[in-house]
Amino acid sequence: MSTTESSVPGEAVAYGGDGPGASKVPAHSVNPIQRDVAKTIFEKSVEGRRAFVAPPSGVPEVALDEIIPANLQRKAPARLPQITEPEIVRHYVRISRRNFDLDSGFYPLGSCTMKYNPRLHERVAGLPGHARLHPFQTQDHAQGALELMYGLERQLAEVSGLPHVCLQPSAGSHGELAGVLLARAYHESRGEKRTKVLTPDTAHGTNPATVTMAGLEVVKVATNPDGGVDIDDLRAKADEDVALIMLTNPNTLGIFDPNIEEIASIVHGVGGVLYYDGANLNAIMGITRPGDMGFDIVHFNLHKSFTQPHGGGGPGSGPIAVSDRIAPFVPVPVIRKEESADGAAPRFSLLDAPADGPGSRTIGKLRGFQGNYGVFVRCYSYIKSLGGTGLRDASEIAVLNANYLLAKLDELGVRKHLPLAFGTRCMHEFVISGGPMKRELGIKTLDLAKRLLDHGFHPPTVYFPLLVEEALLIEPVETEAKETLDAFAEALAEILAEAAEDPTIAQNAPYSTPVRRLDEAGAAKKPRIRQPIA
Amino acid sequence: MTRYTTATDADREAMLAAVGVGSISDLLAEQIPQALLLDRPLEIPDGLSEQEVYTHVAGLAARNTSAEDEVTFLGAGMYDHYVPAIIDMLMGRSEFLTPYTPYQPEVSQGGLQVMFEYQTAISELTALPVSNASVYEGPSAVAAAAYLAKLVNGKTRIVVSAGAHPHTIQTLQTLAVGYGSEVVVVPLKDGRTDAEAWAAAFDEDTSAAIVQQPNFLGAVEDVQALSDAARAGGPKAVVIGSYDPLTLGVLAPPGEVGIDVAVGEGQSLGNRLDFGGPSFGFFAAREAFLRRMPGRIAGETTDVDGRRGFVLTLQTREQHIRREKATSNICTSQALNALAGVVYLSWLGRDGLPELANLLVQRTHYARTTLAAVEGVELLHEQPVVREFALRLPGVDVQGVVSYCQDHGVNPGLALSRTHGGQFDDGLLVAITEQRTKEQIDELARLLGDAVAAQRTGTRQEVSA
């Protein structure tokens, strides 16, 4: 039996059995930062300490009460930390080291496209001409920004195979919301009130959640034995009430649906709109295009295929590309380019109420200003770095890496316990099932994931998609080297072999992390979501 | 091969052999119908070297006039505050910059603790007990709060003050169509929400009451009076306040003046202007709304060894669990920008926040008094202000005045014809930050006087060298 009693940092702990050969961990054998006892910045506050020093006002001062009536004023200051700058830096640098990050390790999180984030992008996005540009700057003084946004729109249009792009949505789910509202506006403009949205049972959770927020109703479509949309079920559910279908292709199983043209024709046949969830665009850039497959609306996750760093959960950006019939309804402002006479530079303008063309019958605005411009700078730079052929190369290697990893798992016997859920090949990601592993070796997908942490790998996406038992969704991306994929495959093989000997090791994992398994149920039962301050 | 794609030709051959296909094209053709394969390269120019990309994108930056290039008095939702150097350093750390959402808490304690601290800071700032870990930005945060109100009371009428940011009202109108609510806008009177019209706007079916503090014209609203009136007329209404967070250094916090849900644009807390984003939206509420909140929430717990740790909690609200029954579709929040927010609030600290807010009040008071004394310039309203105020330049083309000042290196603020055409055509909205000195304010006064005088005499002054 493994022991889990030890809680004192540095104390010897026995793992992997008490008998002869049990490994003993001596005192002070782990990274001390990793074993810090968590203390918040509020608990480090000391009366009288400070970082900020205000500049002198330089103006004749007036009593506050003469400017703002006393009843509208704050009575007691917000109890923010009292702390010096060196202590702030040490605090955050120290806790940062309790994070796993993409720069230091493999992160095969399926459907999240954890590819390398070039540092060039941080440098150019940080130039004052971009970073200190006010969103209400007069347009004559923001021509560089508008040209960049226009250029990014054209690039994304070409990748998607659709003519018009709106950069405004803040993230993928925001792009989805835009898309569903656009489809709704399109139908209403034709005097039709359609209420149903078809979504496969493999869809991302954001799809059904978005549908509800847009006031429509989710109708699930089944998956066929090959992992694609069940065409018979689709035919049965496709009727004149269908506003749109939301699809990811390749889907969340990593499978390119070979029936996509038929699906498009069925949905278009009943007057519905096709929406492409761009979460998996990294599989197809320059290879095939959603517009050519028949989709009317596409959203991009600029934080996936286009290298915006994930930031520990944002910021992202979720532009949409649309067909001609959807274009009049796109959110405003829209960007226009006007060629100048005499070979002068073209002029770019932002229009809140265009008289014609895209945005002329706009659904409105989804947020303030023009969208996450700082993200646009990074993604525009990425596309400039790769070019059209480089984007295709990125997708090709993403697909090759995924298939290679699949082959490697087969070679090492991993797929005996973790079989591929559907098909024999995959696009840029694949799903394996932990069902046999659970029955044969006694460890669950969660245990495998936690034990991977001890091997220095971030686990794949787990328990998604929902229709696969004990699912692991693995996306290796094109910026990872063959040696990394080999090492990851070997770690999986080693964990399975270890479980065959003693499943309790994985069941109690992880051991090497800043904290071990956390009581999530307890956290939800009695939520403590802020630091109490005395 | 691109410089970010790792596979060499030898790697490719070895990997293809392991997969058992002859080429990548074959691998793709096995899976994608022939008719759908793109038979030409993308029409995007070939890739450039790192230095070429730098030069090109820096060239675009050089064609913008940023707050580095001119003295700017622009605000209207985003402000040119000083961002301390430690924020650049911390946001640039790999450990904060490059992870995903903390789905594996054992290796995400840093990010989760930041969220927990951020939530604490927002709760302290707003005097409301629960905060999420951030949403996209300001206007959509207001729309998310209105959606929460609808989930709570099932009502479908949203009342919003015309003092809200125009983008907020437009965003509400766009998203409310989705969730089936109507938006009623209550007008301003003398620069503040018209108290009589406000009180009359509520009924049994009112879902949400929304007020902005300070309002778009910079005026400080009597939020307590507005929330009392909203409750009196609309017993079911959730009262929502959209706040400029830095002004909470001096203004009564929402939790003490009857607000149920406080949201707002977080840019002024340590985030760059970035031409409008990314920044973050904050979202805090009374305890009763905790389980209806959108977005990520970090909670404290312990591990199997009894050690303190943090996890994402109350996830049963969220889209990946609840799907169509989720409280929101939000997945990505603004973790990195919220990090900047909590670092900034810690840097200001308990004493610094009120000091900074008071500095804004004093300089703004000086600027307002000085500018209103310029010939041809009047106050658009006389309500108390903190950091922003509206002027009128009667009979003058305000956009022309803006151009004149910009030609002289000063951006005087927002011509209100751009956001409130037909209503405040002669209005100018002027914002003050700690980066705007007395000398710059005096220079603005001189330029405004010159510009107005020039237009009035009908002779446009030439730019002097």
Image: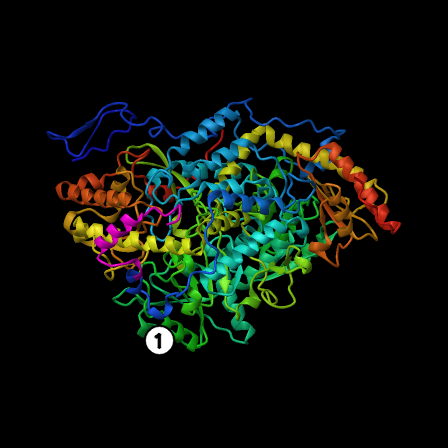
Q: How is the image coloured?
A: rainbow
- The answer to whether B202 appears left or right of B134 in the picture is right
User: Farthest residue in the right direction?
Assistant: B457
SS for dot 1: helix
Rendered position, A503 above or below A184: above
Residue at 40% of width from left, 36% of height from top?
B110
Q: How many marks?
A: 1
Q: In this view, does A534 lie to the left or right of A232?
A: right
Q: Residue furthest front?
A: A342
Q: Work out which quarter of the rendered image holds the C terminus of chain B and state it.
A: top right
- Residue A193 among magenta residues: no
Task: Identify which residue is drawn at 51% across, 38% down.
Answer: B340
Question: Can I make out residue A40 in this image?
Answer: no
Q: Mark 1 lies on which chain?
A: A
Label 1 sits on residue: A235
Crowding near pointer 1: few (<14 within 10 Å), some, many (20+)? Answer: some
Q: Position of residue A145 (x, y in %)?
A: 59, 50
Q: Position of residue B423 (x, y in %)?
A: 75, 57
Give yes or no for residue B8 being in the magenta stretch. yes
| Residue nearest the observer in this picture, A446 or A287 | A287
Looking at the image, can residue A91 be seen? yes
Asked whether, in this view, residue A439 is left or right of residue B62, the answer is left
Of residues A318 and B388, which is closer to you in this image?
Answer: A318
Quarter of the view holding residue A309:
top left
Whole-percent x, y for residue B106 in the image: 33, 38
Query: Percent x, y for residue A407?
Result: 22, 53
Magenta part of the chain = B1-25
Q: Of A358 and A331, which appears nearest the observer?
A: A358
The kind of residue tagged 1 is Arg
**Residue drawn at (41%, 32%) of the image:** A95
